[in-house]
Image: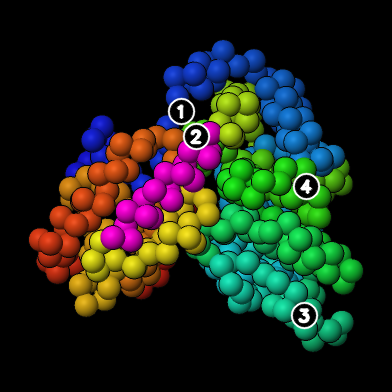
Amino acid sequence: MDPHSPSYIDLRSDTKTKPSPEMLQAMLTAEVGDDMNGEDPTVNRLEAMICEMLGKEAAVFACSGTQSNQMGLRSHCLPGDELLIHELGHIAIFEGGAPAILSGVSCRTLTGEKGMLTLENLRGKIRADDQHLTRTRLLCVENTTNAGGGHYYPLDQLTEICDWAHENGLKTHMDGARIFNATIAAGYSPREVCAPLDTISICFSKGLGCPMGSILAGSREEIAKARRSRKIFGGALRQAGIVAAACVYALENNIERLQEDHDNARFLADQLASIEGISVSPEETETNLVFFDIHPEIGNAMQLSKALHEIGVGIGAMGNTRLRACTHLDVSREKIAQVPAAIREVLKSGIERYQGIATGPYARG
């Protein structure tokens, strides 16, 4: 089925959201200027709002989450440096090798439960000060975790590993693409969770429902470096207030409603648990990401994903048996309630005719 059909239930990602009429009106009436010269009043307002929310000195608007993450990395690292990151971290596996390509930085990937790192995972991983070795320079974390299961960092755990990093001369960066999902689920404030971090990247085009846009926040010195990187990476913006207005609207109207997405995700997980041939742990569904597995004797994740697409349900394959459904503001509880029946239908009719073996994660955003 065409994903643009009004009846299509698109749970592939919260990047599939479209601007509401109210958000479009805010974009239409936005006051604009030349952002490259710091003259776009709407961009300036957005950056000031983020600084106030996160307790950071400065911020810079960016085109995408990948761009803002890479701007952050480049503000901390030199070519030949190394960063520490979970093996499922978006920066390591979903950004096209950008740390190496754009900044000459290598990723040292580490294991850890639920896509998160602890002191136990990090101790002993900083390389010695030796001319033969790359310099370990940065610790990167992701909150919420994407491929790690949609989990949020407990505040004490995040603070502990960031303190360890600073004590050992490292900088800290958070891929906070879904940071507001974390704050709503965990109950801590954006300022609290960002306090131990040097830089944080936030994406507006996911649960907040904007058509595009991300932002990087940090110290004045680091953001000044990031602005230069934005230019180098081809992301310098002119009358960007048209897009920034959507982000301002989202910050004012769409954060608290993320709880609806979390509730819908848990509802979906509870319903999936009753389907024979599907394995899911509803108690592990903390935010808006629902991960579940198809039993391998029935078929693989890509086959199920393709079969569901044919009847109007979009769910992404994340591996040989693993799938991910992502709830968001464009899919109501009524539509989500139709998904379990759709899965039962395709399992009953058989999915072996659908070709394709998933060998890696496909639901990227």
The reply to whether the C-beta atoms of the residues labelled 2 and 1 are less than 8 Å apart is yes
Q: Quadrant of residue 119?
A: bottom right
Q: Percent x, y for residue 129?
A: 87, 82
Residue 254, percent from left and from top: 56, 31
Residue underneath mark 3: 123
Mark 2, residue position: 209
Query: Distance from label 2 to label 1 (Cα)?
Result: 6 Å
Report if residue 230 is visible in the image: no
Please name which of the two marks, 3 or 1, marks the residue nearer to the observer: 3
Q: Of tags 4 and 2, which is closer to the observer?
A: 4
What is the span of residues highlighted in magenta in the rendered image?
257-274
Q: Secondary structure at mark 3?
A: loop
Q: Residues within 10 Å of mark 4 (few under 14, many from 20)?
A: some
User: Within 10 angstroms of label 3, few (less than 14), some, or many (20 or more) residues?
Assistant: few
Which mark lies nearer to you, 1 or 4?
4
Lower sequence index among marks 2 and 1: 1
Residue 192, labelled with which disc?
4
**Considering depth in this image, is 5 or 132 the residue closer to the camera?**
5
Q: Pick whichever of labels 3 and 1 is earlier in the sequence.
A: 1
Q: Is residue 332 left or right of residue 300?
A: right
Amino acid type of disc 4? Glu
Answer with mark 3 or mark 4, whichever residue precedes in sequence.
Answer: 3
Q: Earlier in the sequence, mark 3 or mark 2?
A: 3
Distance, label 3 to label 4, CA atoms, is 25 Å
Q: Nearer the viewer, residue 94 or 106?
A: 94
